[in-house]
Amino acid sequence: PYTYEKSRAAFARATRVIPSGIYGHQGPSEGVYVPREAFPLFSARAAGSRFWDVDGNEFIDYMCGYGPNVLGYHDPDVDAAAQAQARLEDVVTIPSTVMVDFAELLVDTVASADWAFFAKNGGDTTTLAVMTARAATRRKKIVLFGGYYHGVAPWAQKLDYPGVLEEDVAHVLHAPWNDLAALRRLFSEHRGQIAGLVAQPYMHGNFVDNVLPDPGFWQGVRRLCDEHGVVLVVDDVRAGWRLDIAGSDHFYGFEADLICFCKALANGYNVSALCGKDSLKDAVSSLTYTGSYWMSAVPFAAGIATITKLRDTDATTRFRTLGTRLTDGLVGAAREHGFTLVASGEPALFYLRLADDDSLGLHQAWIAQMVRRGVFLTSHHNHFVNAALTEADVDRTVEIAHEAFTAVRADRPLPVGA
Ligand code: PMP
């Protein structure tokens, strides 16, 4: 199994000069039971479906940079488009028309898009969506489904998180996922006060099995939003471009008023986009909202190459096929070793949980065994597939899973006769 001396040494340096060393979700994956020693902390190089850490260990990467790697690291077509644009210009006083080209492509590709507004992070677009809904309706309240993640703006955080004021979340209402009756009650109780509903296309939360929308749920949400004049915002930051290039709302058979994209939009080049309906174009235009790097041209060129390639190769069909082959293989491997592995969510963004103990320990132990054998997974977050992944990679992953389950089983023998 892998060891990580250089990662540890770099982390020790980092903690002296960077708050918490590596902040946020890309920091040490410290389990409750599994020490952070199971995971590498710094990468040195990436290509295709893999990255190499600073100790030289190679990983088949099922986190994909937490989403951006959709075509493979260093996709040659995307890199060529970005480098060609970089030779011309990137950040300049006035924007390049490549921004217009990219907006036109998004309007042609995304079913609910009549326009595109570009920024940098996913959270830039979810906050822009909230402000747009409030400006358009002149109402204050925002509805979120339990288990949400929409970024780190104060309105999207929890009241008990440090630095968050009561006022920041005073107008945020919570509704249970897949419960139309509850949503109807909430809309009635706050009639005329709700500006927008912001939701992921399905519940891909952390630490819990991911939950798809029940049949008819989204259509019911759409109807309720129409009845109450509520702006329906889909946060497609994570699932976007992996389910359907026309948008995850299109995938589930409805149309959002606003849809947020980031992560996979430009295969790792830094751009996000809020897309929306004509009816909200004046509202979004009225806002004070911009940033130093938001019109940089290189990511626009990369985004055009990314979306074009995803479309021309029917990548989303491949993600489903690969994700299904992988989760079927992992679940089958678990069963052979006497374990119950639950795979949930869409196959392109599968979530895993070993269900054989009530603590998180068994699952974390298996994940650690996978990582130390060269398959990068995380314990309690959904995973991602990318177009550079091959059937051979998937089959190798399942082989490694057998080795990892054998190692876990050695610590937890089955009772005699089981
Ligand atoms: N929404 C969702 C569903 C996300 O997964 C994320 C990022 N994990 C965000 C919003 C925030 O995006 P960013 O970190 O780029 O601001």
Image (cartoon, grey):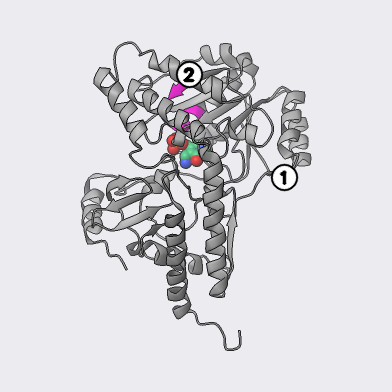
- Return the residue nearer the eye: 320 or 233: 320
Residue 13 horizontal side relative to residue 235, left or right: left
Residue 373: image location, x then y, percent = 36, 65
User: Residue 176: within the magenta?
Assistant: no
The residue shown at (41%, 31%) is 266
Mark seen at residue 143: none
- Relative placement, left or right, of 41 versus 178 is left
The residue at which mark 1 appears reads as 214
SS at mark 1 in the image: loop
Residue at 27 percent of width and 23 percent of height: 86
**Badge 2 local density, few (<14 within 10 Å), some, or many (20+)?**
many
State whether residue 42 is above or below residue 299.
below
Residue holding disc 2: 103
Residue 344 screen position, x and y as percent: 60, 54
Q: Nearer the viewer, mark 1 or mark 2?
A: 2
Q: Is mark 2 within 8 Å of ligand 1?
A: no
Q: Nearer the viewer, residue 206 or 72?
A: 72
Residue 302 seen in render:
yes
Q: Is residue 129 above or below residue 182?
A: above
Q: Amino acid at mark 2?
A: Ala
Q: Let me know if residue 124 is in the magenta part.
A: yes
Instruction: Give the quadrant of residue 81.
Output: top left
| Quarter occupied by the N terminus | bottom left
Q: Which residues are magenta?
A: 118-125
